[in-house]
Image (spheres, rainbow, N blue to C red):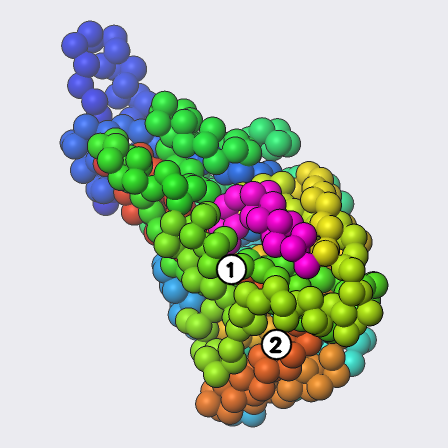
Amino acid sequence: MKKKTFKLMLVAMLAISMLLVGCSKSKETSSDDSKSSDSGSNKTELVYGRGGDSTSLDPITSTEGETFKITINIFENLVQYGDQDTTLHPALAEKWVVSEDGLTYTFNLRKGVKFHDGTDFNAEAVVFNFERWMSGNADDFPYYTMFGGYKGEEGHVIKEVKAVDEHTVQFVLTRPQAPFLKNLAMSCFGIASPAAIEKYGDKFRENPVGTGPFKFVEWKQNDRIVLEKNNDYWLDGYPKLNKLIFRVIPENSARLNALKNGEIDVMDGLNNSDEESVKSDANLQVIKRPSMNVGYLGFQTTVKPFDNKLVRQALNYAVDKKAIIDAFYGGQAVAAINPMPSSIEGYNDAVKDYPYDLEKAKELLKEAGYPNGFEMDLWAMPVARPYMPEGMKIAEVIQESFSKIGVKAKIQSVDWATYLDKAAKGEFPAYMLGWTGDNGDADNFLYTLLDKDSIGSNNYSYYSNDELHDVLIKAQTEADQAKRNELYKQAQVIIKEDAPWVPLVHSTPLLAAGKDVVNYLPHPTGSEALTKVEFK
């Protein structure tokens, strides 16, 4: 039985009033809530400050982290990651069986689960979602390329999704895909209410309905998103909070001031230079997100002069990564050599970085036919990201370095949603971006970001190499992890030579929160459900 917590008042009428309120909320209150009240806290509303707004609240339609910060609290997947790692655990599916040939996955679904609109979660709902996604395209559902394309395309790995019975769903693949289960746990594949999708159509992006711990209330764009507790959530005793408010406060320093003033309870994008001031404040705490990211400078490899490999290599030699890390990361980052961090299995530590060498850069530019350099636009992110907390300032450092080899870079920017849209369409010849891994697999970095299948979704460099593609597809199909690792090491050698990016940093992102916030477990993927968070 769940305990009811009543707060005694001196005035009789108020006592009765509070008693009635306590009774009406009895379903929401757990034994842990009683402990919180006994310790003096009765806060049940958390305000989260972040640097930018979401671009959509339908997770399959986006690839950016500000969307997933919200949607991971609204939607759930068949399987989910651990609280702070990418191990796999039951979610909407209680258990699953994989056939010996790796082609058939059978999931037993959790019974009694309802979508926020009161409709039933069942096998037909799973089939509906996957049919919707696979029948789309990269413009509508960009992340679905994790499954090799869309219905009718040669690389598409899902042959069929069928409801065996009300609580059993089966996936049949055209070929084995080693990271298939890890892909299913990615935030973008949260299961949505079929009834709500049919009701709202294109407006579902603004009216999300899932099975998760919190329900959508309102979205005031570029201001706030409000979620409230799902009182019918299947996990007994959760969530702990009654309301979540995600506020947009673009400047990192302004967010920190809001935290210090008590206007918000948690902030992301803490500047490394502010870490000590937060640590010295008795009312605040620093929270470190496990690192699984890369920040990079990318080149659109189909436009001049960046279609020339020698130019891309020259610019790699002209970036002083150490100076960037020293100036902006406060020791909470390491220089990136490959497109994925060394914590990912299959990392190739034999690949050596392009050293900071301006003379070598000039030699390569001359060889490429640009002895006097050239002019270029350098697009810089308008918002702080976990892998690049001060993007505009880092762009200025790169601009200065490039000027020393005759390359005149003009820094450009637009609002965040437009930035992502234009980058995806290949409209930025040179751009700064980054990636926080979704599932802990090398495939999610190398194939997702740099394979030709991902052009139009996450391959903003429009980089295409047939040899790389063959290696990455073979790695997807290979069941033996040791053999997969060797293939990914080959892939990193190819990418290093072609230089579609300047990999800049792998960072340890910092958050800050009030001291009274407990059970906040930051996830390496960059977004976490706040199901267990409460105030002490």
Which numbered dot is residue 496? 2
Residue 304, picture quadrant: bottom right
On the question of residue 418 being in view, the answer is yes
Residue 393 is one of the magenta-drawn residues: yes
Measured as percent of width and height from the top left, residue 278 is found at 31, 36
Packing grade of label 2 (10 A; few <14, some 14-19, many >=20) is many
Q: Please state which amino acid type lies under the numbered disc 1.
A: Lys
Measured as percent of width and height from the top left, residue 184 is found at 55, 68
Q: Secondary structure at mark 2?
A: helix
| Residue depicted at 69% across the width and 44% down the height | 411
Measured as percent of width and height from the top left, residue 170 is found at 59, 76
> Quick one: quadrant of the N terminus?
top left
Residue 496, picture quadrant: bottom right
- The residue that mark 1 highlights is 321
**Image position of 423 with respect to 54: above or below:** below
Q: Secondary structure at mark 1?
A: helix
Q: Please state which amino acid type lies under the numbered disc 2.
A: Lys
How far apart in space, not on screen, are marks 1 and 2 (Cα)?
Answer: 16 Å
The boundaries of the magenta stretch are 386-405
Measured as percent of width and height from the top left, residue 277 is found at 30, 35
The one of 489 and 505 positioned closer to us in this rendering: 505
Main SS, magenta region, reads: helix
The numbered mark, 1 or 2, whose residue comes first in the sequence reads: 1
Which numbered dot is residue 226? none
Residue 257, picture quadrant: top left
**Image position of 256 with respect to 360: above or below:** above
| Residue depicted at 76% across the width and 59% down the height | 373
